[in-house]
Image (cartoon, rainbow, N blue to C red):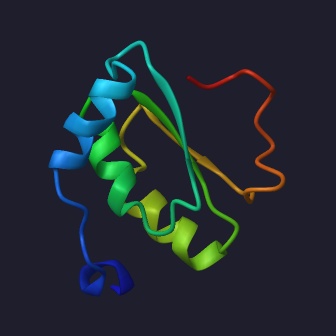
Amino acid sequence: MYAQYRPHYPREIIAVLQKIHPINQNTIIADIGSGTGIFTKLLLETGAIVYAVEPNDAMREESESFHGRSPNFKSVNGRAEATTLPDHSVD
Protein backbone atom coordinates (compact mmCIF):
# COMPACT_ATOMS: atom_id res chain seq x y z
CA MET A 1 0.00 0.00 0.00
CA TYR A 2 3.05 2.27 0.12
CA ALA A 3 2.63 3.15 -3.57
CA GLN A 4 -0.89 4.53 -3.20
CA TYR A 5 0.44 7.43 -1.11
CA ARG A 6 3.34 8.26 -3.39
CA PRO A 7 3.08 11.18 -5.81
CA HIS A 8 2.63 10.25 -9.44
CA TYR A 9 4.55 11.54 -12.42
CA PRO A 10 2.75 13.69 -14.97
CA ARG A 11 1.95 11.84 -18.21
CA GLU A 12 3.52 14.74 -20.12
CA ILE A 13 6.96 13.43 -19.15
CA ILE A 14 6.57 10.70 -21.79
CA ALA A 15 6.09 13.35 -24.52
CA VAL A 16 9.26 15.07 -23.34
CA LEU A 17 11.18 11.79 -23.47
CA GLN A 18 9.73 11.01 -26.92
CA LYS A 19 11.37 14.21 -28.22
CA ILE A 20 14.76 12.93 -27.04
CA HIS A 21 14.37 9.31 -28.14
CA PRO A 22 11.37 7.62 -29.74
CA ILE A 23 9.74 5.11 -27.38
CA ASN A 24 7.69 2.25 -28.79
CA GLN A 25 7.32 -1.54 -28.64
CA ASN A 26 10.89 -1.93 -29.94
CA THR A 27 12.41 0.20 -27.19
CA ILE A 28 14.19 -1.35 -24.20
CA ILE A 29 14.33 0.87 -21.11
CA ALA A 30 16.01 0.51 -17.73
CA ASP A 31 14.11 2.30 -14.96
CA ILE A 32 16.91 2.60 -12.41
CA GLY A 33 15.67 2.97 -8.84
CA SER A 34 12.19 2.02 -9.99
CA GLY A 35 10.78 1.76 -6.48
CA THR A 36 7.17 0.60 -6.47
CA GLY A 37 6.86 1.07 -10.23
CA ILE A 38 4.99 4.36 -10.47
CA PHE A 39 7.12 5.65 -13.37
CA THR A 40 7.50 2.12 -14.72
CA LYS A 41 3.73 2.15 -15.34
CA LEU A 42 4.00 5.16 -17.67
CA LEU A 43 6.89 3.56 -19.52
CA LEU A 44 5.02 0.27 -19.96
CA GLU A 45 2.04 2.13 -21.41
CA THR A 46 4.25 3.11 -24.38
CA GLY A 47 4.66 -0.55 -25.30
CA ALA A 48 8.37 -0.56 -24.41
CA ILE A 49 10.12 -3.38 -22.59
CA VAL A 50 11.04 -2.04 -19.15
CA TYR A 51 13.69 -3.43 -16.82
CA ALA A 52 12.68 -2.12 -13.40
CA VAL A 53 15.91 -2.09 -11.38
CA GLU A 54 15.33 -1.77 -7.62
CA PRO A 55 17.50 -2.86 -4.65
CA ASN A 56 14.79 -2.63 -1.98
CA ASP A 57 12.98 -5.97 -1.70
CA ALA A 58 9.69 -4.56 -0.41
CA MET A 59 9.46 -1.90 -3.10
CA ARG A 60 10.47 -4.31 -5.84
CA GLU A 61 7.88 -6.84 -4.66
CA GLU A 62 5.17 -4.19 -4.71
CA SER A 63 6.13 -3.29 -8.27
CA GLU A 64 6.09 -6.97 -9.21
CA SER A 65 2.59 -7.40 -7.78
CA PHE A 66 1.40 -4.36 -9.74
CA HIS A 67 3.13 -5.04 -13.09
CA GLY A 68 3.98 -8.73 -12.93
CA ARG A 69 1.38 -9.78 -15.50
CA SER A 70 2.82 -7.52 -18.17
CA PRO A 71 5.09 -9.45 -20.55
CA ASN A 72 7.13 -6.24 -21.05
CA PHE A 73 7.90 -5.85 -17.33
CA LYS A 74 11.21 -7.27 -16.16
CA SER A 75 11.99 -6.99 -12.45
CA VAL A 76 15.67 -6.73 -11.56
CA ASN A 77 17.25 -6.90 -8.12
CA GLY A 78 20.01 -4.35 -8.64
CA ARG A 79 21.12 -0.81 -7.96
CA ALA A 80 22.50 2.09 -9.98
CA GLU A 81 26.12 1.01 -9.51
CA ALA A 82 25.37 -2.64 -10.30
CA THR A 83 22.24 -3.06 -12.39
CA THR A 84 23.20 -6.62 -13.44
CA LEU A 85 22.13 -5.70 -16.99
CA PRO A 86 24.63 -6.39 -19.78
CA ASP A 87 26.43 -3.41 -21.28
CA HIS A 88 24.60 -1.83 -24.22
CA SER A 89 21.44 -3.85 -23.51
CA VAL A 90 19.03 -0.91 -23.23
CA ASP A 91 18.14 2.04 -25.40
Q: Position of residue 42 (x, y in %)?
A: 27, 47
Q: For the C terminus, which image quadrant?
A: top right
Query: 59 left or right of 42?
Result: right
Residue 33: % across, % down:
58, 62
- As drawn, is 26 to the left or to the right of 8? right
**Residue lying at 33% horizontally and 35% vertically, measured from the top left:** 17
Q: Quadrant of residue 38?
A: bottom left
Residue 52 position (above or below residue 47): below
Quarter residue 8 falls in:
bottom left
Number of numbered discs present? Answer: 0
Which is more toward the observer, 35 or 62?
Answer: 35
Which residue is painted at 30% across and 50% down in the image? 41
Residue drawn 41% across and 60% down? 37
Let me know if residue 67 appears in the view: yes
Q: Quadrant of the N terminus?
A: bottom left
- Image vertical order of residue 4 relative to residue 17, above or below: below
- Say whether residue 47 is visible: no
Viewer-side residue, 18 vs 59: 18
Q: Position of residue 7 (x, y in %)?
A: 26, 77
Q: What residue do we see at 26% from left, 38% from top?
A: 16
Q: Quadrant of residue 57?
A: bottom right
60 vs 14: above or below:
below
Residue positioned most to the top: 26
